[in-house]
Image: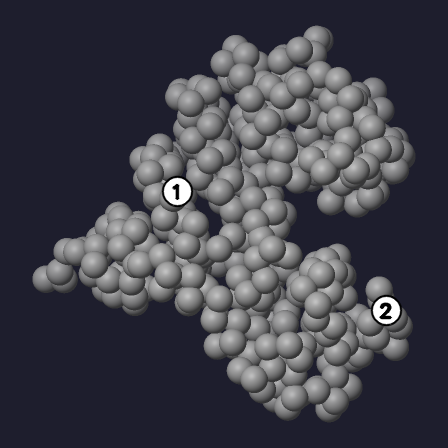
Amino acid sequence: MIAKCSGSTNDKDHVMLMATDRSDELECALRSIENEPIEEARTREAGKFADFAGPFTKTLVLFGAGPLGKSTLAGLRRAGIEPLAFADNNPRLWGKDIDGLKVFSPDDVRSRYGDSACFVVTIYNGSAVRRQLAALGCKRVAPLPALSWKYPLNFTAAAGIDLPHRLRDAAAEIRLCDSILYDEVSRRELREQLIWRYWLDYDVLSPPSNEKDTYFPLDLLTPLKDEVFVDCGAFDGGSLNSFASHWNDRFQHVFAFEADPASRAVLANNIKEMGFEDRATIMPYAVCNLNGPVSFACSGTVTSHVSTSGFGSTVEAKRLDDLEWPLPPTYIKMDIESAEPEALLGAQQLLRRYQPILAICTYHRSEHLWQIPNLIHSISPEYHIFLRRYAEECWEGVCYAIPSHRLRKA
């Protein structure tokens, strides 16, 4: 018989071995986290990148010249580090300068720097690229979270990754979250994320769910023919198009919230092309826990967000509770770049009165993984709460809250 978890080890492998069943793993991990001396945790997290990079901790190539690569470049420059180059699989980028850094093909960058640099993978779903670089013979390859731990002031925690030692302060909240999750898949996701975030162990993570079902898990819920969908963070209409596809175009109305003017113009055009003008209302607001003007970083991309720094354009914010709803919402999705808790607080009466299904993103800040389920439960304990993830590492996580009458029948 395998021994019960004593809570005295700080070794991830021991955590897995000492659990007598799957439900013990979370508690064993939490007790290990709580019992590891904080200075040991800080030393381990600060040195994790060197485990990947070896002697090349400041001699870096960024593989992935998209938004994540560019934001990583900016963070490194704030830390006083200038990478050698970008690499990318997109031939259209080869030879170009992006933010002052040249982009090379994988073969070219391998011949130049394969033995003399660490390749940091700066794309989401980076496992295939890590395998590609290993196959090319690149000596040192690192995932972005390890770099984030080394330079926390430049990368954490707003990017969804936080320092491991901070998890000890969240142990009570994590235990509460585990107790309210409805199914084993959700509890597994919570404990695997906890272990991965503390030890950066990639082997523990289950494969992500199918990305085409992001926001709309029809294996969990029963759709309505007269669904009233509230899309907070509608961007260019991609989530609306996915919703309509999952519902076979059978829905009553959509209220699409998009505060960024550039994205809103694209959204309006795409709604017209989809043929939904008569069933869609564009709401030009940020969704918050206040009514009135707020500072908003308008980028015309999915990263547009309410700005706490005071820099940005001024847009109007609305509480969902204070809007007049000609049709009661039956399904609310929020992907609003870390403003989800404030938006939920501004919708408490709506949730209690109508019990709409909720699809709330949890990945913009590390602590949202457990805080958002706990917040929804505190607002309306009648909800059944699920966690799902649609990308690798910690990305594209969604919390679903489903009332009993909308659960999919077995």
Residue 170 bears which disc, if any? Answer: 1
| Location of residue 137 with respect to 273 vertically, above or below | below
Answer left or right for 30 relative to 409: left
Residue 163 image point, x, y percent: 48, 55
Residue extending farthest to the left is 1
Indicate the amino acid at tag 1. Ala
- Quadrant of the drawing holding the C terminus: top left
- Disc 2 marks which residue? 100
Residue 152 image point, x, y percent: 57, 57
State the residue in front, 242 or 173. Answer: 173
Indicate the amino acid at tag 2. Gly
**SS at circle 1:** helix
Label 1 Cα crowd, 10 Å radius (few <14 / some 14-19 / many 20+) = some
Residue 114 image point, x, y percent: 66, 87
| Image quadrant where residue 139 sits | bottom right
CA gap, disc 1 to disc 2?
Answer: 40 Å
Q: Residue at x 42, y 61 (%)?
A: 42
Label 2 Cα crowd, 10 Å radius (few <14 / some 14-19 / many 20+) = few
Q: Residue at x 21, y 55 (%)?
A: 7
Q: Residue at x 41, y 54 (%)?
A: 165
**SS at circle 2:** loop
